[in-house]
Image: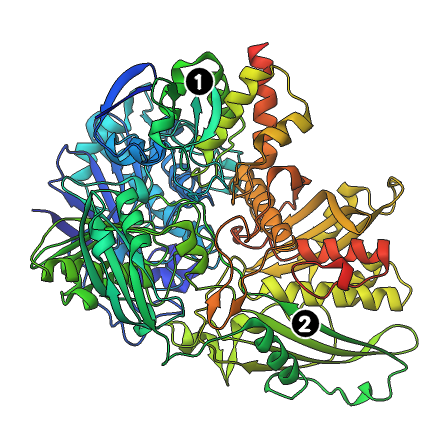
Amino acid sequence: MVTLNINGRDTQVDVDPSTPILWTLRDSLQMTGTKFGCGAALCGACTVHLNGQPIRSCVTPISAAVGQKITTIEAMSADTVGKAVQDAWVKNDVPQCGYCQSGQVMSATALLKANKSPSDKDIDDAMSGNICRCGTYQRIRAAIKDASKALA
Amino acid sequence: MMRTEWMNTPGPLALATPELSRRRFLKASGVIGGGLVLGFYLPVGGGRFANAQAPAAPVSAPNAFLRIAPDNTVTIAVNRLEFGQGVHTSLPMLLAEELDADWSQVRGELAPAGDAYKDPAFGMQITGGSGSVAHSYMQYREIGARARAMLIAAAAQQWQVKPEDCKTSRGMVLGPAGQSASYGSLANSAMQLPVPQKVALKDAKDFKFIGKPTPRLDVRAKSSGTQQFGIDFSLPGMKVAVVARPPVFGAKVKSFDAVKAKAIPGVIDVLQVVTDRGGQGVAVIASGYWPAKQGRDALQINWDTGGVEKVSSDQQLVAFKELAKQPGVVAKDADVSRLAAAPRKITAEYQFPYLAHAPMEPLNCTIDLTADSCTVWAGTQFQTVDQGAIARTCGLPVEKVTLNTMMAGGGFGRRAVPTSDYLVEASNIAKAYRASGKSAPLKVIWSREDDIKGGYYRPSHVHRAEIGLDSKGNIIAWNHAIVGQSILTGTPFEAFGIKNGVDSTMVEGMGEPYEVPMKLSVHNVKANVPVLWWRSVGSTHTAFVMETLIDEAAQMAKMDPVAYRKKLIGDKHPRHLAALDLAVGKSGYGKKALPKGHAWGVAVHESFGTVVAYVVEASVTKGVPKLHSVTAGIHCNRAINPMTIEAQAQGAALMGFGTTLPGAAITLKDGVVEQQNFSDYTVARMNEMPKIAVHIVQSEDPPSGMGEPGLPPLAPAYANAIAKLTGKRLRKLPFDLASA
């Protein structure tokens, strides 16, 4: 048994410590908001926060998260910044297929927590690890700026 | 039990559109929870692509398109796959328009496989050809209008007034003396009334939803991680399967050692299974994806690749180039005898690689196979074909196969596979698992590597063009050859789409709208690489060839490329001119001064009935091109949801741009795909996204599609700008300025 702190709650999981956070969330805890896209930290669909920092949960074993705080998309509606980001996503009608958007929201939330008014370049730098095949990038940029304004 | 009532609909609408007389409406009662349930049925065999192998079958149960519940919730079935293109919102908009619904009460619901949900034009349930809104525009409106008439009739009966004295507004029927009743409160009594044979549809001036920018119904779920996709679906006791597929398409297993795989905690079983194209693979079944994937990677498999062709891209290119110089099967046969004596000539050879679709949600399929039935959950674009293929594989009658359509994370064509590859494979795994004496629902998940290496690519192509121009720069002869694999051979579309040996998807977009004397021939090459339609299909390459060559001809004629196009288009294609003029006007082309080192590029192309023109602004710095902005002029006839149109144009443009980036190619060596993941198969990222402004031509004509047409003209417009800056005509995708 491994104890993980997920969204503020200590949670026990019975998986090998080398198991990635992603599959522990999805298969052991049925928390499917975090998505599998590439399995190699190349697309950002699996982004969660580890102690507030955005990480790729598909390549991060749970052994690296013991005693740390994991935050997932499921906690974002109760997070001031996360909620502002989600509301901006809705306002800008950002998603298309929507599959990458959990990861996009997590990366954007981490960005805005670290940088309240990001420049265009800050946004591109923070978000270019998150692939969207539908091409929602232009609305993501606009939504991040809206969220930034809403939080000011 | 459900009771159905069939109604013919020979109304005035039938006169306008002949096929409407073949449609039938029905209602079903006895539905749990009550309310009004209205369905709709188009007999099989009515569609353009109707297949002789799929004879008309009676509908066994009503498939509801609309449910109005006593709590006023309006649930509208979506007879397509939603995978980003917005049909989950735009189709309900059409029905809600005629129903006069309160949009806040409207919900969308993806329909399972069912005869009622077949595309009215294709005659099969498919999401493709950018046809969802175009083909179902009248279908959804008619259902909404009939339901509205029934709700009015129910209210009129209740109030003892004439139906024609009642009005509707936002989910309410309003009576002449100030009476009002919500649709939900009337639903049960409306259900007792007959479905009207004749209904009048709204006049366009009264549209409330059609044409109004409307946010997606699924936007909140998709912004909060609560939207369930196929890969998120699970069943009690479900196991996960990951498959080792042959390294060369269709190869077989000589032997395998599963000792290490079985030693991984969570691994339940390792089974040899039938894979696509007559191949064999090994499936690892485990408690979850991670042990299954680890188990798969720990397998030691001795493959037998002896019996299958091993394609190498380098050799294929040499062979294609050689073939392109030979005459092939004739697709267009204009007189090109003036070529030899033409005072000026363009000779050009183009190369296009295989491309993977790489939707963000990896392929997956959940299957629950029992002794006498099978239930499948998958984000598929091709329910009719898939349901039949699953039934054949499992040895079940088709009515024993339930196929539930799941929300999908992209697709771009990869989820509409004539061989139903990933669904048949899942069926084979489920069969093998049952045969081993075990029984559990299974979810087969593909890794990204499995997806990139898994075939069904946009086919590679070589084009060769010889164009003769007169001294004024007019095109007097155009001899053209295309070499590639046929997509439609062996599919249900073959009879319709291949005529005289020419696959229409290989030549679509050639010639039109330009009045040029073109001789076009094709070479259909067979190769052991599965190919498939990829967003905008043939236009992914034909638009590039046409629009860069026309641009080059304009340059040779010393004419402005927009003026040259307009002259060649003439007056027979007003939609092309309107789209082009809109993009040109909004961009400031020819008026606005660009920064030093920047240039305009232009392209216009029609695909799937929609014309898209792009004017782009690009620069080249130290040999590296950059796309700064894109101005789009779109002619898709009546705009249903301008927000969807904008998103589709932006997304398709970005995908087209992605094909120009270094690494946007699938290559093979000795039969093995060389790419693995997003590390070596490039897709566009945010820092590369140009600003894309979308402008829509106003039109009152019935809508044409938007899923694909935004893709084709982007790459040629960009190449034309680069040619202006560098003098280099790029003829190879992805772009390689250094070797051009």
Q: Which mark is residue B354?
A: none
Give x and y (percent) for residue B522. 59, 81
- Write down the quadrant of residue B317 in the picture: bottom right
Tag 1 residue: A51
- Count of numbered marks: 2
Tag 2 residue: B511
Residue at 62%, 60% in the rendered image? B606
Q: Chain of mark 1?
A: A
Q: Nearer the viewer, residue B320 or B379?
A: B320
Give x and y (percent) for residue B696. 64, 44
Q: Nearer the viewer, residue B537 or A30?
A: A30
Q: Chain of mark 2?
A: B
Q: Residue A9, can we see it?
A: yes
How far is disc 1 from disc 2 in space, using C-alphas? 58 Å
Give x and y (percent) for residue B712. 62, 58
Residue at 31%, 69% in the rendered image? B302
